[in-house]
Image (cartoon, rainbow, N blue to C red):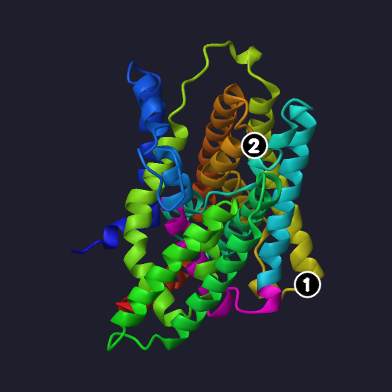
C-alpha cells in the first residue's frame, strides 16, 4: 500500500488540526461527559505494573513513536543534513533557548502566583504542525528555513521533556532508570549489528523488544515515558534508524498525532465571560505568539552574529521572523505540560488547554499569512532547491525500504 500521501507535512498538519477540532466539538456536546469518562477509564488489570488511563496510554505510550521519529530526523540533520557542523547546529540551539526563555518569563509575569507552576507550558513548539504550515505556505523558502525550524522545535521539545523530568516528576526509581539506560546502550549496540535487508530480521525483532522494555523501564521509573523515544531515536545507527522512520512515519502522522490531538483538545469550554478567564489563559495566549516570535528572532540574529555564520548561509531577518511566528504553535508538548502542571487543579487544565489552542491558532494564522506573502518574494531557484531536497528525502526512503 502506498502511504506516501500521509508522509506529507501538509496532510499531517491537517489531520492534527482536524482531530483537535473534532475533540473540542465533541467535548462540548451531549457526548462530552461520556468522552471524559472514556479518557479516564483504566484497564481491569495492570500491564506489568503499569496502571494507566486510556488518555495516558496515548500520551505516555503512543506519543513515544512520534518522539522517536523526530529524534531520528534530528540526528540526520545533525550528521548529514543542514546542521552538520558545530556552527550550523549552534544557531538553532541559541534560537531555541531564546524561544524558551522569553515565553516562560512572559507567562510568569502575566499568570502570577496562582498559575506559577505552569511556566514551562508556552516553551514548546509543535513540530508536525509548524512544519505542515511551512510546507503548505512556504514552498519556495530555502531548505535552511525548514532545517532551523525542525531543529529548534525538536530542541525546545527536548527542553520541555527535560522540564517534565525535573519539575513534574514526583519521585524517581533509580534502579528502573539505570536499567533503562542499559536498554538504550543495548539498543545502540544492536543498531550497529544491523546489516540491511539480508539476515536483519533477528536484529529487528531484538531492537523492537529492547525498545519496548526500555519504554516500560522509563515509565516505571517515574519519568515521562516519551523520553525513551527521544533517547532511542538519537542513538540508533543510520541504516536501521531510516528503516524504522520510513515504516513508523505513516502511523505517527496518521494515528498517533491525530489521536493525541483529539484526546488533548477534548475539553469542555467553561461557560464564563471572556473577561473572567484566569490569568493562566491569558499568559499562554500572549506568551506563545509574542514570546516565541521575539525570543526566537532576536536569539537567532545574535547567534548568527556571535558565531560569525557566513552571509550566504545565514537566515535573513524576514526568514527568522517567519520561523519565530511558527514557533508559537505550541500544541503537542504544550498540551502535555499543561496537563502535568495543573493535574491537581482540573479547572486550570481546561483554561490552559484553551490558552494553548488559542495561542497556537493565532500563531498559525499570522505565521501562515506572513509566509504566504514572504513566499512570493523568492525566485524559482529556491523552489528548485526545495525540489532537490525532496528528491534527497525520496532517496532516503528508497534506501531504507
The quarter holding residue 42 reads top left
Q: Left of 346 or right of it: where is 193?
A: left
Residue pointed to by mark 2: 341
Q: Which residues are magenta?
A: 62-88
The quarter holding residue 116 reads top right
At x 75%, y 56%, the residue is 299
At x 66%, y 20%, the residue is 278
Residue pointed to by mark 1: 307
* Discs 2/1, front: 2
Q: Main secondary structure of the magenta part?
A: helix
Marks 2 and 1 sit apart, C-alpha to C-alpha, by 36 Å
* Residue 347 counted in the magenta span: no
Q: Nearer the viewer, residue 233 or 343?
A: 343
The quarter holding residue 384 reads bottom left
Visible in this render: residue 65? Answer: yes
Q: Position of residue 91 (x, y in %)?
A: 70, 66
Q: Left of 320 or right of it: where is 69?
A: left
Check disc 2 and report its element: helix, strand or loop: helix
At x 57%, y 68%, the residue is 179
Neighbourhood count class around disc 1 (C-alpha, 10 Å): few under 14, some 14–19, many 20 upward = few
Q: Left of 113 or right of it: where is 353?
A: left
Amino acid at each position: 500500500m502506498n502511504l506516501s500521501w500521509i508522509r506529507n507535512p501538509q496532510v499531517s498538519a491537517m489531520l492534527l488540526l482536524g482531530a483537535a477540532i473534532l475533540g473540542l466539538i465533541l467535548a462540548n456536546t451531549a457526548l462530552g461527559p461520556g468522552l471524559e469518562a472514556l479518557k479516564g477509564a483504566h484497564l481491569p488489570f495492570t500491564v506489568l505494573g503499569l496502571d494507566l488511563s486510556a488518555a495516558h496510554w496515548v500520551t505516555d505510550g503512543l506519543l513515544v513513536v512520534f518522539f522517536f521519529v523526530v529524534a531520528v530526523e534530528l540526528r540526520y540533520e545533525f550528521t548529514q543534513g543542514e546542521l552538520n557542523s558545530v556552527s550550523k547546529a549552534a544557531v538553532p540551539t541559541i534560537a531555541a533557548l531564546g524561544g524558551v526563555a522569553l515565553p516562560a518569563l512572559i507567562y510568569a509575569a502575566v499568570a502570577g502566583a496562582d498559575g506559577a507552576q505552569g511556566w514551562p507550558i508556552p516553551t514548546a513548539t509543535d513540530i508536525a504542525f509548524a512544519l505542515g504550515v511551512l510546507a503548505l505556505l512556504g514552498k519556495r523558502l530555502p531548505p535552511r528555513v525548514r532545517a532551523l525550524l525542525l531543529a529548534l522545535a525538536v530542541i525546545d521539545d527536548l527542553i520541555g521533556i527535560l522540564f517534565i523530568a525535573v519539575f513534574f516528576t514526583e519521585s524517581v526509581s533509580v534502579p528502573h532508570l539505570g536499567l533503562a539506560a542499559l536498554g538504550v546502550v543495548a539498543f545502540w549496540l544492536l543498531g550497529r549489528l544491523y546489516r540491511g535487508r539480508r539476515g536483519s530480521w533477528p536484529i529487528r525483532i531484538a531492537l523492537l523488544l529492547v525498545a519496548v522494555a526500555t519504554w516500560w523501564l522509563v515509565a516505571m521509573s517515574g519519568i515521562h515515558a516519551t523520553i525513551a523515544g527521544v533517547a532511542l531515536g538519537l542513538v540508533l545507527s543510520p541504516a536501521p534508524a531510516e528503516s524504522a522512520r520510513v515504516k513508523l512515519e505513516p502511523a505517527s502522522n496518521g494515528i498517533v498525532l491525530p489521536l493525541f490531538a483529539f484526546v488533548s483538545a477534548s475539553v469542555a469550554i467553561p461557560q464564563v465571560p471572556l473577561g473572567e478567564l484566569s490569568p493562566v489563559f491569558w499568559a499562554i495566549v500572549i506568551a506563545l505568539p509574542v514570546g516565541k516570535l521575539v525570543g526566537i528572532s532576536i536569539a537567532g540574529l545574535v547567534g548568527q552574529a556571535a558565531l560569525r555564520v557566513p552571509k550566504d548561509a545565514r537566515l535573513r531577518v524576514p526568514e527568522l521572523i517567519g520561523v519565530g511566528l511558527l514557533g508559537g504553535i505550541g500544541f503537542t508538548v504544550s498540551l502535555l505540560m499543561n496537563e502535568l502542571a495543573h493535574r491537581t487543579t482540573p479547572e486550570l487544565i481546561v483554561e490552559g488547554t484553551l490558552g494553548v489552542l488559542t495561542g497556537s491558532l493565532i500563531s498559525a494564522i499570522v505565521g501562515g499569512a506572513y509566509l504566504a506573502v514572504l513566499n512570493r518574494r523568492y525566485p524559482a531557484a529556491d523552489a528548485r532547491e526545495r525540489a532537490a531536497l525532496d528528491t534527497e528525502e525520496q532517496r532516503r526512503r528508497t534506501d531504507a525500504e
